[in-house]
Amino acid sequence: MNEARYAKGAAMRNENAHLRRILADAEGASFVELAFVLPLFLFMLIPVVDVGRAFYAAIEVASAAHAGAMYGVENSSDTAGMVLAAKSGASNLSNVSATAAYGCECSDGTSAISSCTSIPSCTYNYVTYVDVTVTSPYKPVLGYPGLPSSMNITRELRLRVGGD
């Protein structure tokens, strides 16, 4: 009888030793951890990329407005050229729209007259200006609560050209 109990106890010790070896074996544990963490990491990375894309688009739009206005400083009555220069300045973005205008106004910013069809009556002097507005649509990769699914990034730049 003792021999049977001894054999049964030895068998249980062998099973326990085998179970301890299996539980102590850490091979593959890092892959399981990676499987849990990787989707979370990607879920956090996508909004960062979205914000970066939005900032890039905003910088491109501002640069395009500046390019159009700088063209307008040299050629103030050429609004088509200002629009073309602005669109060329944002060549990395799609569906960019631009508008340009020029006019005259008093040096304090009052009495604006589009296309300088007449000279404004000012207390001191008047100045001519160019005004370029550039707009580009932006659509985030994912939809975020509280934000629209698409939005327009717009930049307007007004520069004084000269005057009297």
Image: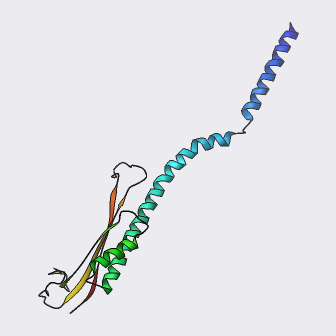
**Quadrant of res 61:** bottom left
Furthest-top residue in this view:
1
Residue 97, horizontal then vertical, whole percent: 32, 67
Q: Is residue 33 left or right of residue 161?
A: right
**Quadrant of res 98:** bottom left
Q: How many marks?
A: 0
Nearer the observer, 64 or 49: 64
| 77 versus 97 height, above or below | below
- The C terminus, quarter of image: bottom left
By what rule are the colours in the image chosen?
Answer: rainbow
Residue 45, horizontal then vertical, whole percent: 51, 53
Furthest-bottom residue in this view:
164
The residue under the point 58% across, 41% down is 36
| 127 versus 45 height, above or below | below
The residue under the point 40% across, 70% down is 90
The residue under the point 62% across, 44% down is 34
Residue 93, horizontal then vertical, whole percent: 41, 65
Residue 48, horizontal then vertical, whole percent: 47, 56
The residue under the point 43% across, 52% down is 141
Nearer the observer, 6 or 14: 14
Furthest-left residue in this view:
121
**Quadrant of res 19:** top right
Nearer the observer, 37 or 121: 121
| 23 versus 30 height, above or below | above
Q: Is residue 10 left or right of residue 63?
A: right
- The N terminus, quarter of image: top right
| 150 versus 125 height, above or below | above
Q: Is residue 14 left or right of residue 147?
A: right
